[in-house]
């Protein structure tokens, strides 16, 4: 085991003990290590680099019309309560001579989502990453998510959903381009 994993496991053991539970009882004996491994997985985005992730999957293309990748599932952790938020991300870009390999959009979403995060920053990070690797004339990102910190605690609103958007380049400048994107992602629901 790595020192980091051992340290995390010890912290989870202390949390269980601090809650008044017996970390040595049968059902909890392996929980600290399982929780440490889960947390390490849920925050693996810190160990990823955009350049390595894209790995030269940017290709020359004459395509200059809008490209939309819709309904990319995302799972993240609220940095305020360390509870999950779960949703989907919609990305569009206007290529400027280059297109990005399709799977890379989901990988970019995951890289930034797998960090302690707030949805507003996640939306911006994804848009700026797509813009930087493609050199697109415009990028748009919309995220819709449900936040367990709002559903499980606090106000306990089960049907609440948060939507955030980030429009860069032509999507910010042109109402028609923005409207086309928003119309495309609202169809087929």
Image: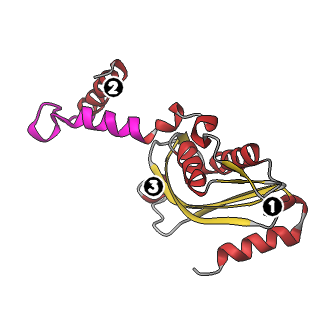
Would you say residue 146 is visible in this rendering?
Answer: no
* Pointer 1 with pointer 2, Cβ within 8 A: no
Front label number (2 vs 3): 2
**Mark 1 or 2, nearer chain start:** 2
Q: Residue at the location (87% across, 72% down)?
A: 176
Is residue 35 toward the left or the right of residue 125 in the image?
A: left
Q: CA distance from mark 3 to mark 1?
A: 43 Å
**Mark 3 or 1, nearer chain start:** 1
Residue 114: x and y in percent read 50, 43
Would you say residue 122 is visible in this rendering?
Answer: yes
* Pointer 3 with pointer 1, Cβ within 8 A: no
Q: Which residues are magenta?
A: 19-41
Q: Secondary structure at mark 2?
A: helix
| Residue at far top of view | 3
Q: Which residue is mark 2?
A: 5
Residue 181: x and y in percent read 75, 70
Residue 73 in the magenta stretch? The answer is no
Q: Which residue is mark 3?
A: 148
Return the mark for residue 62: 1
In front: 32, or 15?
A: 32
Q: CA distance from mark 1 to mark 2?
A: 47 Å
In front: 53, or 176?
A: 53
Asked if 66 appears above or below 8 in the picture, the reply is below
Q: Quadrant of the C terminus?
A: bottom right
Q: Residues within 10 Å of mark 3 (few under 14, many from 20)?
A: many
Q: Residue at the location (23% across, 30% down)?
A: 17
Is residue 65 toward the left or the right of residue 115 in the image?
A: right
């Amino acid at each position: 085991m790595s020192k980091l994993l051992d340290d995390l496991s010890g912290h989870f053991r202390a949390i269980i003990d601090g809650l008044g539970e017996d970390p040595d009882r049968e059902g909890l004996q392996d929980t600290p290590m399982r929780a440490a491994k889960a947390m390490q997985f849920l925050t693996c985005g810190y160990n990823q680099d955009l350049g390595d992730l894209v790995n030269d999957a940017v290709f020359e293309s004459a395509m200059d019309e809008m490209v939309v990748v819709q309904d990319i599932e995302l799972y993240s952790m609220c940095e305020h309560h360390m509870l999950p938020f779960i949703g989907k991300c919609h990305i569009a870009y206007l290529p400027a001579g280059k297109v990005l390999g399709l799977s890379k959009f989901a990988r970019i979403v995951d890289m930034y989502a797998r960090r302690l995060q707030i949805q507003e920053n996640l939306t911006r990070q994804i848009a700026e990453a797509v813009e930087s690797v493609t050199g697109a004339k415009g990028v748009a990102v919309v995220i819709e998510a449900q936040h367990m910190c709002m559903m499980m605690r606090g106000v306990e609103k089960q049907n609440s959903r948060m939507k955030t958007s980030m429009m860069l380049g032509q999507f910010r400048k042109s109402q028609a381009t923005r409207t086309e994107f928003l119309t495309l992602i609202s169809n087929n629901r």
